[in-house]
Image (tube, rainbow, N blue to C red):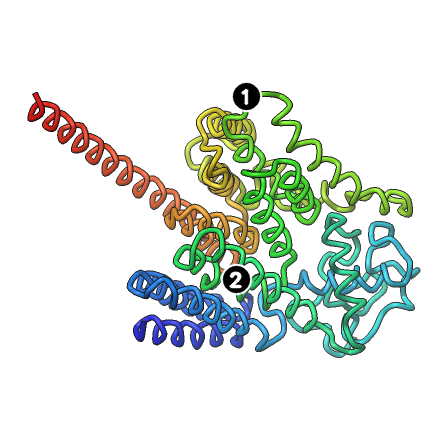
Amino acid sequence: MRLTVVLLAALVAAVACAITRAGQLADPAGLTAWYAVCWVLFAAAAWSLRRVPARRAAALVIAGGLAVGATGLLDGPRTSTDSYRYAWDGRVQAAGVSPYDHPPADRALADLRDEWLFPDRSVCSQTYLSWLPEGGCTRINRPTVPTIYPPVAEAYFLAVHTLSPPGSRHKPLQLGGLLLAMATTSLLVRVAGARAASLWAWCPAVPVEAVNNAHADVLAVLLAVAGIVVVARRRVAGGALLGAAVAAKFLPALLLPGVLSRVRRPRDALAVLVPAGAVVAAAYLPYLLVSKASVFGYLAGYTAEEGYQDASDGRYSLIRWLLPDAWALPVVVVAMGCVAAYTMIKGDPERPWSGALTLTGTAFLLLTPGYSWYALLVVALVALDGRWEWLGVAAAGAVAYVTGMGTAAYAVAALLVAGVTWCRAVARGVDQRRAATADAGGRESQG
């Protein structure tokens, strides 16, 4: 246990150094080096936990998760400006305006501006600030387009704004991220055990993306983990939670094929899909009633801007190594369809998160996204399922975001997954042959 505590203390110190240094635009090499140190210490601490008695392990995972997560509170958002949009959306809703109707740059909302989100022009040349059409700048990224976030996320932004004291700026969203991350840790400890839960609680992606950058993905992760755990026993309740996860961030929709593993009767599938769809519809309904513009906001523009429509900007990079760019999207659609079908036909209904991890991780390797916070969902699924090799996907996302070397990073992650999966298969085959030999020997001795 002493070794684990020492490694955890070193991990906390390393994450604190990574969060309080310059962001990826100012010093990508230095930040990458600190991230590497954090991931090595994380792996060592999680491995050392194997020798800690189960009773102490649970308390250590929770306490360590709190210490690691709290490092995200040491500074303002360092590598992302998304939380400034969250704060703005909460403020706009509190004023009785739909967040989908006006971009932050719209002069119709000028009365809601303050010096925090819309600083003085004298600092507009600083990093991470966006220029406004009429002059001046804002901390909010893409200020000329409407919000992209789904309704459950928007409700969360409003709740945080409502509960925040005046002038608290970024801290309430960071505290909210820490609370959501710790709730996920507690749930994973209860469901998967302390050792497995450490793969989420101590992962460097959590303090960086869930707490410091306060990404709303952590809300979707908590709802997704709760949903996929509950659905194995109560389909309707689990489906409703999964619907809430999708309405917080669209990515958890990838979990549905895993949830439907070996479901043969249509009514069993509908018992999950209908409540999930109903929750999504119910979440969107209030915004549909009050919004004049589309409640999907900048979603279509975002997918085009990020290169998901035309295989540009580093998307589908592993496929584009082997095939022409024009083939990338069709190949991804076919490949994902095949993996989803296999998951639904051969998946384990008692462990729906196993198929969900395979499908979600495969989607990341095929799409090669450039934003590291998306992989928080993968980290949580790894903690549920135990296949640690998929953590390489989360590490690859961090490399892609900080350095732009996403293709090489995702290639290494793919090789790691393939190699460990092959080793597992070989070991399983050896065990089966030994069991068959022992069984045959037993029958001969009885004869």
Residue at position x 62%, y 69% from top? Answer: 77
Residue 188, position as x, y percentages in the image:
50, 55
Q: Nearer the viewer, residue 316 or 91?
A: 91
Residue 95, position as x, y percentages in the image:
90, 63
Residue at position x 90%, y 66% from top? Answer: 110
Q: Which amino acid type is marked by label 1? A: Arg
Mark in front: 1 vs 2: 1
Residue 235, position as x, y percentages in the image:
61, 36
The secondary structure type at the circle numbered 1 is loop
Residue 158, position as x, y percentages in the image:
79, 61
Residue 437 placement, left or right of 163: left
Q: Nearer the viewer, residue 310 or 108?
A: 108
Mark 1 nearby-residue class (10 Å; few <14, some 14–19, many ≥20): few
Above or below: residue 275 compared with residue 440? below
Q: Quadrant of the C terminus?
A: top left
Residue 175 in sight in this render: yes
The secondary structure type at the circle numbered 2 is helix
Q: Which mark is residue 264?
A: 1
Residue 211 placement, left or right of 286: left
Q: Nearer the viewer, residue 300 or 194?
A: 194
Residue 22 in sight in this render: no
Mark 2 nearby-residue class (10 Å; few <14, some 14–19, many ≥20): many
Q: CA distance from mark 1 to mark 2?
A: 37 Å
Q: Which mark is residue 206?
A: 2
Q: Quadrant of the N terminus?
A: bottom left
Above or below: residue 223 compared with residue 362? below
Residue 92: which quarter of the image? bottom right
Does the CB distance between marks 1 and 2 fall below 8 Å? no
